[in-house]
Image (tube, rainbow, N blue to C red):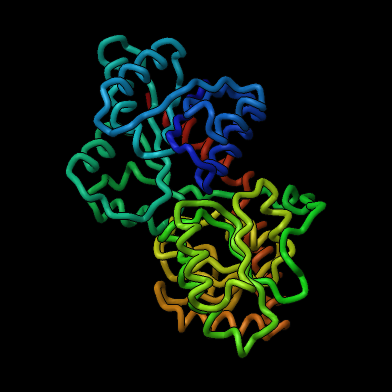
Amino acid sequence: MKILYIDTEKFWRGGQEQLFSLISGMQDAGHQVMLASPSRGPLGERVDRLGIEVVDFDQGTELSYPAFRRLYNLMKKTSPDIVHFNTPLPVLPGGLAALALSRFRGARIVTVCSRRVNFPLKTRLSRLKYNHLLDRILTVSESIRKTLISNGIKPELVETVYEGIDPEWIDAQQTDHLPFSKDSLVLGTVAHLSEEKGHIDILKAVSLIRRKAPKTRCVFIGEGLMRGQLERYAAVLGIDDIVDFIGFRRDSEALMKHFDVFCLPSLSEGLSSAIMSAMACGLPVISTKVGGIPELVIHEETGLLVSPSSPEELADALYRILTSPKDREHFGKAGRVIVESRFTIRNKLKNTEQHYNLLLSQG
């Protein structure tokens, strides 16, 4: 197959990590792949190092005629069998470009979109583009699939394909330098520093348990616009001496192995790649009952789930895990088993490829 992937994100987040593994896997499977994305973004740079063609593509707004022309000309030139949108912004111009090529030039192009967020569709335009410009929407969780259908998307268009990681690759990751102290129990998270990830709730929870669990260190790996606000808030709470802001790290999986507990109290989440990596590292996970997280983290089996925006409940869960070596070991081992059985790159590639083949066979 000839597959064109399109991504408009300029930062490295979970969605870009998952697309990178998909592109790499499809190339290894013998398919001809290409990426359209901001060429100087981290995704484009990594894909380019694989020897895969990266076409510079940027888009400011959804209703962008230049984006339509750019994608129309790119599809006309490369004749892809599949166009797979990794972010929602290019679905409208890209879907229209594929439709125009199909109607006026007889070039059938299968259009696929990944959906990683569990937000409801707010506009009629969103429902129109998903229902009429896509052949398949691949959601990363059942929760997202149900949300789309309840918002008016045709059920036959929506399928769940769980994202995945490579546990053996994670096992092999090492770091020569640990940028935080291991004198204490390390409560860590890896996430873009944005409001929906719940970092503020972690800070509030840590401040509540500091006296009861004094040998605790909090580590944030990730970068984002909220960093300054979070650093100031840690100081206001009087816990800045035990909170480390590490920034974006390419070796986050290696660093994660030195955590004792992984915490991601998201306010909204599709399915977290960082949680998958933490479970592959054998870490107990504390997260929230939102989106697809309960499909990944099983309460009282691989970790603990709390209500979103509830720092008191989060503090109780953190205190329990930090003070119970038995729970940490039990949850960590169970999490590794679940990742190996359900959330691997191998499964993701196989299921995605099956959808591609099915859609092409229906032509």
Extreme-right residue of the structure:
176
Which quadrant of the rendered structure holds the C terminus? Answer: top left
Residue ID at (37%, 20%):
71
In the image, 297 versus 348, the foreground residue is: 297
- Please identify the quarter of the rendering in which residue 18 is found: top right
Quadrant in the picture for residue 259: bottom right
Task: Work out whether residue 139 or residue 54 is closer to the camera in this orientation and state it.
Answer: 54
Q: Is residue 193 above or below residue 107?
A: below
User: What x and y, as percent, mark residue 167?
Assistant: 70, 53
Image spot of residue 125 (x, y percent): 20, 39
The one of 265 and 131 positioned closer to us in this rendering: 265
Comparing 197 with 271, the one in front is 197
In percent of the image, x 33 and y 41: which residue is there? 157
> Can residue 294 be seen here?
no
Residue furthest out toward the bottom: 212
Tell me if residue 198 can be seen. yes
Left or right: 37 as drawn, with respect to 49: left
What residue do we see at 39% from left, 52% from top?
117
Q: Would you say 169 lies left or right of 61 here?
A: right
Q: Measuring from the top left, give residue 30's x and y in whole percent.
A: 64, 24
Is residue 197 shown left or right of residue 324? left
Residue 119: name its quadrant. Answer: bottom left
Q: Measured along the vertical axis of the image, is residue 198 above or below residue 135?
A: below
Residue at the image position 63 percent from the left and 73 percent from the top = 241
Residue 358 percent across, percent down from the top left:
45, 33
Q: Is residue 327 above or below residue 92?
A: below
How many numbered circles are shown?
0
As drawn, which residue projects farthest toward the left? 124
